[in-house]
Amino acid sequence: MKEQSYSVSIVGMGYVGLCTAATFASRGIKTIGIDIDEDRIGQIQRGKAPLREPQLNQILSRVVKRKLLKATTDISNATDTDASFLTVGTPSQPDGSIDLSYIKKATESLGQALRNRRRYHLLVVKSTVIPGTTSKTVRPVLEQSSGKTIGPGLGLCANPEFLKEGTAINDALHPDKIVIGSNDKKSANELTRLYRRFYGSKLPPVIVTNPETAELVKYASNAFLATKVSYINTIANIAQHIPGVDVNQIAEAIGHDPRIGPLFLKAGPGYGGSCFHKDLQALVSYSQQQGYDPHLLKATEKTNEEQADKVVELSERLAGPLEQKRIAILGLAFKKDTDDIREASSIRVIDRLRKKGATLVGYDPMAMPNFERVFGNTIELAKNSHDALKGAECAIVMTEWDEFRRLKAKEYIAQMRNPAIVDARRIYNPVEFRELKFAGIGFGP
Ligand code: UDX
């Protein structure tokens, strides 16, 4: 590996791929971003991010201007670089199992392009894939299409990512660990060297293992976090029946125990986002295929699905039967500071409220264009939170946006027909909302 002119290509300019490409380029590594979507590539070439992520636009415009990041639809350009990272999507099939078609297609195209190249090339599987994918799917496709075998001239590693939306750039610059899985020593060494170059003295712990372990680490991590959320939501649902009990105090207390830890103990309307549901489904399906039924993980998912019912129950407690009642939904994004609505709990709650015949009006500071794109005009969308509250008989806080946190009780009272709030994210101090009807997840009656 030539230390001075190391270059990488990233195949798949979705969320993970683009953030990874931007951070590599920001550290002076020549990077090529590759995607089949011409619009997306066009935007990146102009230094514009095709998705919302704090810091991403600034970094992109800088690295594109300095020619450290190039974007193309032509995957054969990847062969001019030292390593290619696969960051294509691994969506769910209708039965929940993983769809590896993008992985196979990208690997095949890359292999074909590598066929007549003599220089060493390392393929790194960064996409979330079930155990065995790197060795049993990617490897044969790569070897067949390139006409080479893994060894001195061709490398292969699994290397999962752990980026969170909203803090992806910071997570990429300061990861808590790097996991490298390979059956080939040279591949693992090459990737370790790349990361050593990238992080310098701030290199986090590097766990070098086999590909299957690396692949399962990613699922184990997401399944644990999702289970932590469903766990605290379970405690919240119990607490909700006990006068004077507040799940937030319970979370604070148990979080002091270092064996438990304080993070990911925020009770709410259930987890959303592009990863948790998809990855749990894929892991459950994979495990069942191996002959083991993972009850705990299925319960995590079921608890999450049912958490939407808890939100609806609280609105019925405050507003009575919901038929033809105007309900304001504050927040559509799956968490704050993103326009992403994939698997958002708001969608599950909206679906249930519609079935009950409620008239819905939604507002979100960022996610309304995405919501409209997917759901058309199934619900009315308001220009701002005050408009959403106008004439409503119940307001449900579905996303913990700072903008909602700043709303005062008197603003709710001034706008609403029946001032009643369901705080599904527990952003308010109930004492300050004593003048109106108030219910919160995990907050006793
Ligand atoms: C997650 C993982 O954290 C990340 O490591 C992985 O690479 C991708 O999936 P992300 O989907 O961006 O990242 O969201 P995250 O911040 O983890 O939140 C997931 C969901 O859980 C959100 O809907 C959030 O509101 C919810 N959540 C999180 C809670 O309800 N309570 C909590 O205490 C924490």
Image (cartoon, grey):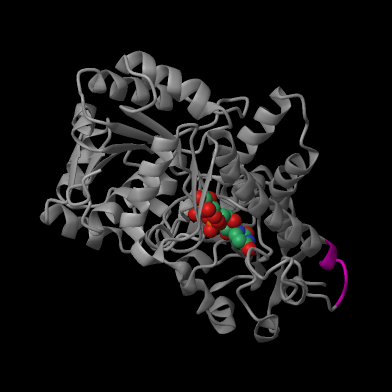
Asked whether 219 or 145 is in front, the reply is 145
Q: Residue 271: image x %, image y %?
A: 62, 53
Q: Residue 434: image x %, image y %?
A: 71, 84
| Most frequent secondary structure within the magenta stretch | loop
| Residue 294 seen in this snapshot | yes
Quadrant where the image shows the C terminus: bottom right
The answer to which quarter of the image holds residue 396 is bottom right
As for residue 189 lying within the magenta part, the answer is no
Residue drawn 82% across and 72% down? 444
Q: Residue 172: image x %, image y %?
A: 40, 57
Q: Hey, which residue is sitting farthest right in the picture?
A: 242
Q: In this view, does 145 lie above or below 83?
A: above
Q: Residue 146: image x %, image y %?
A: 30, 17
Location of ligand 1 given as a quarter of the image: bottom right
| Residue 323 seen in this snapshot | no
The answer to which quarter of the image holds residue 58 is bottom left
In the figure, is residue 98 to the left or right of 102?
A: right
As for residue 240 lying within the magenta part, the answer is yes
Q: Is residue 29 above or below residue 416?
A: above
Magenta stretch, residue numbers: 238-243
Quadrant where the image shows the N terminus: top left
Residue drawn 48% across and 21% down? 137
In the figure, is residue 177 to the left or right of 367?
A: right
Asked whether 106 or 245 is in front, the reply is 106
The answer to which quarter of the image holds residue 337 is bottom left
Asked whether 60 or 444 is in front, the reply is 60
